[in-house]
Image: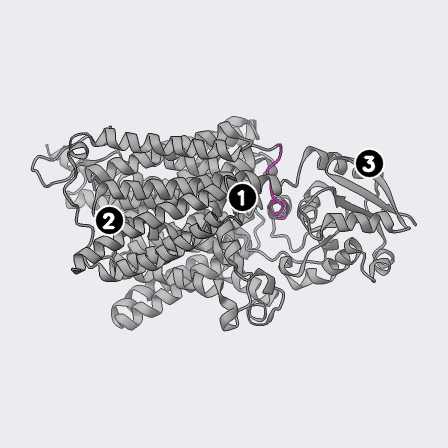
Amino acid sequence: MIADTIVESAPTPLVTRRVWVALIPIVLIAVLLRGMAIYQFAYPVGPDYGLHLLYGELFLDSGYAPTSAPNYQLGVTSWPLMPGGPLVYALMSGFSGTPIFDLIHITVFFGVIEVTGVYLLAWRVFKRLDCAVIAALIIAVLPVYVDMMSWAGYPNLIALSLMPLAFLAWLDYWERPDWRHLIIAAIIVGGVAYIHHVSTLWLGQTLVLFAVVEVMRKPVASLRKLLPIGVVGVFLALPIGLSAIRLATEQGAVSVLTGADRFDLSRLTWETWARVSTPMAVLLGIGGMVAFLRSRLPDRAQKTLILSYALITLLYLFGWAVGIRFYYTRALFFVTLPVAFGAAALITLWSSALTRVLVSAVLVISIGVSAIVRAEAASEYFEIVTPSLVEAVDWLEDYSEPDDVIVMGALLGFQLPHLLDRPMMAALSADLVSNADALLPSSEATAVMMGLSTMDAVLVERDVRFVIVRTHTPDVPDPNRSRAVMNAHPRMELVFRNDDVLIYEVRR
Amino acid sequence: MTSAAIVRLLRYTLLILLALGSLGVVAAEVGIISYAHFLYLAAENLIAVGTLIAFALVLTSNREFAGSPPVRLVREHPLIVAAGAGLISALASLALLIAADVDFFVYAAAIAALMGLGVGIVGYIALTDLHEAGQGRPRSIRWYALFAVLLVIAGALRVTAPGTPLLTYIFAPLLYFLLPGFALTFALLPDDARWLDHLVYAPPLSIGAQFVGVAWLVQVGIPIAPQVFYITASVILLLGYAIALLRHRRDERRGLSPSSASDEQ
């Protein structure tokens, strides 16, 4: 039994010291759901981890932050990312001596961190065990994480998993602004800011908005808390801040956020919302957040912080309305905390405990079953590295020269640079391009893969030797079109095929 | 109609909309109906209406959770009711997964069973109004000796047996996710922090502190290498120990530490 102490007088509730027992199944749900993309397939699914972990591998090999990916997009692109995400794996590889690509399984441990972090944050905010546990349970079953694992957005997932703890440390400091809580908050917030540039943007803007509101409410008291943590934070995390500024400058972040026109297709639709976060998340996110803000359980600072985070998320979800250019659907991944807290607040609307149990069951079953079904479908959809692909890579190693240029679609383009040491060009669509350096090689590769008018010029100018096409979707551009183009082109000869890929050689 | 009656009506309506909406959505998710079916479209709209009702309910209801008297079954047998809720949830989830004809059924069934267990636990907590005991005890600085031993073992394994399962799955995760973090939590968290607080804070502190260290090394141009990671972790452990030792001695001087109390006895 969880309850091991019964207090004597009648109105006093049961208390327990063994709340960790309640967290065990929730943590296991998070691990298994997130782990489906890793444990159920020959290789972890998803395109993105190829480049992220390659960065970590290059970092370890050279000892310095790599400036470009040697093979990716012919080596002309800089790395548009904060080092922290890949460094998670690099540090583990350094500690263990295990190759970095054999450590992908540690990603699911961040599900444990997030569930326990949300539990503790919700406990601080609601001061009720049932609210804290339901918030942790909702976080564990939300399909957002399943989606991220399927396309292998590991740095995003890692940063998101640590965000509740950054908020917890911040609130602890705000409530008790002593030197110990200051150091804890500075270390955790600084660390989270090092992981992924989008999360850094979210975290920074949330804390700035919080600070502005608190300064307006209580100027002197707030400044007496903000100045010390600002000074210590700058001192401790100066290199992290410089890294963020350097990245923003190199990538032209301000001009992208205000002027880029390649994100229009990523505007949020109901279908995208329903697929990534479930329709129920509307009710939890909106109705639940209103319940949270009206509730007397959280204090004002806690409400301000969670509301700031929700507002920043809302701003980027619908940024086109105010002139912000952003990959809008990416903001969906940040709705998790408002949805979890909204669920915890919503169940307090019913006074009957039985009704609260019923509501909890309905939410967990509907969201959880959705997540399980989607986990399988999304993981199968994004299974990029397979034994057949590895066979094709081995063939290319044997039958190509070190300088042979290879063109491929986007999803293969994210994975092949770490599998094969050859110069490559990946056909990314404009919305997938993270930095301006990649625009030219991407567009040239797209011209080849889609058979555009400049295809022949690119084949000559870049001295392309091979083109790899997936035998099935997904890929960018559509592999069926690419296959038709290659089959029809007089210079293309099919030299290798298996279940997953076709390799065409460009006749000289 | 009194305002209390209106609030009650809104609550029941929201409950029904929530249940029906979830049913329709999950039926489409598992393939019982298509996403173009009227029932799915209706379910989405019910959820949207439910959102508005939740909005109205929150604005009109100024009473926090009040806790009405439980029915007799709940009062006398909360564990049985909660276990029943959990079992029904697990079975319902399994039935839906069977309808979905998932490929990895055993794996999915394990998740469904855990979901049922989670619902049962939430149910028990809600039905018994269970609360968490608040306080922990100060941590002895002798723990740092254990941390140091584990660090040395990990270092020795790194040199003698790199890449082995013992290092990859036990010692390296300990060293990366926990030990530096515990060294800091024992030094920095309040004395009444529970073990759960230490466990939750340790990973982000461990990761954050090591990131800060590595970021400074990168900034000043020192190449990073596995030895550097071990040195960084050691420095964090030492710093944590130094802070914990200073606190311990300060508490002893004030007569606050458990060791000084036992000495006096």
The residue segment tinted magenta is A42-51
Q: Are marks 1 and 3 on the same chain?
A: yes
Queried whether the magenta region covers residue A175, the answer comes back as no
**Residue at disc 2, secondary structure:** loop
Residue placed furthest toward the right: A508
Given the image, what chain letter belongs to the residue carrying mark 2? A
Q: Establish if B75 lies above or below A134.
A: above
Along the line of sight, the residue nearer the viewer: A436 or B109: B109
Q: Which numbered disc, 2 or 1, marks the residue that appears first in the sequence?
A: 1
Along the line of sight, the residue nearer the viewer: A26 or B156: A26
Where does the N terminus of chain A fall, quadrant-wise?
A: top left
Q: Which residue is mark 2?
A: A350
**Residue at disc 3, secondary structure:** helix
Residue placed furthest toward the left: A9
Along the line of sight, the residue nearer the viewer: A21 or A354: A354
Say which residue appears at 35% left-offset and 50% top-offset.
B17
Task: Please name the amino acid that badge 3 sits on.
Answer: Asp
Q: CA distance from mark 1 to mark 3?
A: 33 Å
Q: Which mark is residue A398?
A: 3
Of tags 2 and 3, the one toward the viewer is: 2
Q: Which residue is mark 1?
A: A149
User: Which x, y percent locates residue A476?
Assistant: 69, 52
Task: Please name the amino acid that badge 2 sits on.
Answer: Trp
Task: Please name the amino acid that badge 1 sits on.
Answer: Met
Q: Quadrant of residue A356?
A: top left
